[in-house]
């Protein structure tokens, strides 16, 4: 494939490569410097190499967030810790459940819906009776019959 058919667009959050009018786009988990990025194609293998340096400021923000979390953990009261420990049982457990439930017998056979909630049984189309016309009905012969 000719190199002129390849177009690469590097943005801060995604990379878009266009090959023969077909678009390949990847979302990036972290921000990159589009100005410092470089794209090279190997002359031997034809592989496309895209180098994108990460933005360092995002790592600084993460460090500040970690420091903030540490200071909050130190100032957290014991009551809040106990409340948080009490809420642990609300999470999904991977292991064996505390109480096993037999899902096959959730509803009893004698448990019936009220009559107004039960579905009515429909009669097949072949057994339905034709409805009688209303007394004010006027048959128009120009209208074709429904089939």
Image (cartoon, rainbow, N blue to C red):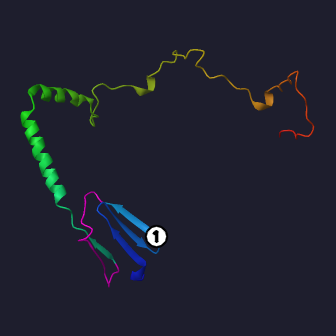
Residue 30 within the segment the image draws in magenta: yes
Q: Position of residue 107 (x, y in %)?
A: 47, 21
Badge 1: few (under 14), some or many (20 or more) residues near its Cα, within 10 Å? few
Left-right relation of 84 to 131: left
The picture places residue 16, in percent across and down from the top left corner, at 37, 67
Residue that appears at 18% across and 30% down: 84
Q: Is residue 133 left or right of residue 48?
A: right
Q: Nearer the viewer, residue 70 or 56?
A: 56
Residue at image x 79%, y 27%?
A: 128
Kind of element beneath mark 1: strand
User: Is 41 drawn above or below residue 55 in the view shown?
Assistant: below
Along the line of sight, the residue nearer the viewer: 128 or 75? 75
Q: In this figure, which residue is indicated by the disc labeled 1? A: 22
Where residue 31 sits, quadrant-wise, is: bottom left
The image quadrant where one finds the N terminus is: bottom left
- On the image, the x and y values in percent for residue 134 come to 85, 22
Figure label count: 1
Q: Is 9 located above or below residue 68 in the figure?
A: below
Q: Which one is nearer the viewer's eye here, 54 or 101?
A: 54
Q: Residue at x 88, y 39 (%)?
A: 143
The residue stretch that appears in magenta: 28-46
Say which of 100 and 120 sits in front.
120
Q: Is 53 contained in the magenta span? A: no
Q: Which residue in the rendered view is the most extreme toward the right?
A: 141
On screen, residue 1 versus residue 61, left or right, reads right
Residue visible at 16% across and 52% down in the picture? 61
**Considering only vertical position in the picture, is 25 above or below 99?**
below
Residue at the left extreme of this rendering: 74
Point out the image quarter for the C terminus: top right
Quarter of the rendering containing residue 142: top right
Percent position of residue 106, x then y: 44, 22
């Amino acid at each position: 494939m000719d190199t002129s058919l390849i177009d690469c667009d590097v943005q801060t959050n995604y990379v878009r490569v266009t090959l023969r009018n077909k678009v390949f786009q990847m979302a990036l988990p972290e921000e990159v410097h589009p100005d410092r990025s470089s794209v090279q194609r190997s002359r031997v293998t034809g592989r496309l190499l895209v180098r994108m340096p990460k933005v360092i400021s995002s790592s600084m923000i993460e460090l500040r967030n970690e420091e903030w979390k540490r200071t909050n953990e130190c100032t957290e009261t014991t009551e809040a810790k106990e409340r948080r420990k009490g809420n642990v049982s609300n999470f999904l457990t991977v292991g064996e459940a505390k109480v096993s439930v037999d899902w096959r017998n959730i509803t009893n056979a004698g448990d019936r819906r009220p009559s107004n909630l039960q579905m009515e049984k429909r009669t097949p189309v072949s057994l339905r009776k034709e409805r009688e016309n209303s007394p004010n009905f006027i048959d128009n012969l120009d209208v074709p019959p429904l089939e």
